[in-house]
Structure formats: C-alpha cells, structure tokens
Image (cartoon, rainbow, N blue to C red):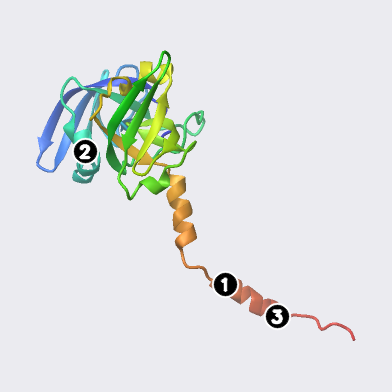
Amino acid sequence: MFTGIVEALGTVMSVQRYGDAARLRLLAPNLTEGMRLGDSLAVNGVCLTVATIAGDTLEADVIAQTLLLSGIGSLAPGDRVNLERAMPASGRFGGHHVQGHIDATGSILNRRASEHWDVLTISIPSNLSRYVVAQGSIAVEGVSLTVIDVDGCQFSVGLIPETLARTTLAHCAIGTAVNLEVDILAKYIERLLSAPSTSATAGETSALRISSKHQVPLAG
C-alpha cells in the first residue's frame, strides 16, 4: 500500500526487453538504504518488486499486464520517475489509499500556469470517469492529487509548489500520457451497492432457528 506522497525522483538507467516483459534498472538516491529484495516500490505509480539492489541502484521486473495498462513500457534511459516505497505500519498517511495498480493511462489536455501553482486537465477513459468526483482523490503518475472538477471524460487537478518541485508532473507537457489510479474505495462502494442482497446468511438463519426453539411463552 502506498499513499501517493513521492519520496524522491529517480532516473531510468536501462530498460531490458524480454518479449512481453521488461526489467528496469533505476538510480534511486536515498531510497535503497534499508531496502530488501522483494520490497515493493512505486515507479510513476506502478507497484514493482525490487529484484536486485547495488548501492543506489535497483532493478525491478515488469510483466505484460503492467506494460499494457501503464506507461512504464515507454520509459527510456535518462527519464525521471516518481518513487515511493510502500508505507510502513507506523508511517504517516499523508495522501490516500494508493495500491500501485494502474487502471489506465490518460493524456494531459491542458496546462494552465499561475504565479504559484499549475492546473492540469487530464483525460480519463469513460469506464473510469464515474469513480472521479470533485474534491475526491486520484493518483496521477503515482502522485496523490485532489480533483478540482470533473467534466465528462476529463478532470482537472492543481499542482502546488511542493508537487512541482518534487515530482515529474512539473515537466508534463500537453499530450503527455500519464498513469491513472482511481480511488479504490469508490470501486468497493460500487461493488457493495451492486451486489445482490440476501435477507440472512446461513449462520444468521441457524441462529434464528435455535432462538425460536427456546422461546419462553408469555404469561397470559
């Protein structure tokens, strides 16, 4: 589990292709200390498993499904990436529930800069737009952001100076593809509301039967 609070900017050192899979080699300054093989690391919002560690560099494998749904497959040596280690149980929950499971990619439709912050308008596939609400949360390139508004299959978010200084979103131009992960809580709520309801579970039914056998008649 991640929170969408980027810890550092890493650099892609190499991308090795293996048919429908790939291995990324990353420079991850200040993040590898204490890291172990098998740990989870979000790279532009994509949860990957650390396969090797050597100094400030690490490697992680990317499978076909991840390459299909995310922009990881388009990374090239020299690209900067947003990095976040999995949140420890004792950590601060600064963003929102981010799984690192990318739902789809969107595209930067517009970028409006002001004196202190930027507003991005981003496209989102129609099958995901229902999960995005104004003042709700969404992860863009692994960054937890608050939605300003939603208009059909596009939404807008604001980038404060801290976000511009610490993430790759500062350099995303119009037309750039970005990884999107909608709020998982919205999916769970939809699933619960759409599930067929039952009057009682088997356990509840049995309990009711036992209770009725020992019912004491009222004195009349």
Say which residue label 2 marks.
Answer: 62
What is the CA distance from the residue labelled 1 to the residue labelled 3? 17 Å
In the image as oriented, which residue stretches furthest toward the top? 115
Say which residue label 3 marks.
Answer: 212
Chain-order first, disc 1 or disc 3: 1
Asked if residue 166 lies left or right of residue 69, the reply is right
Residue type, numbered disc 3: Ser
Quarter of the figure that contains the N terminus: top left
Residue type, numbered disc 2: Val
* Label total for image: 3
Q: Nearer the viewer, residue 139 or 213?
A: 139
Quarter of the figure that contains the C terminus: bottom right
Q: Are marks 2 and 1 in contact (CB under 8 Å)?
A: no
Nearer the camera: disc 1 or disc 3:
1
Q: Nearer the viewer, residue 97 or 28?
A: 97
> In the figure, residue 33 lies in which quadrant?
top left
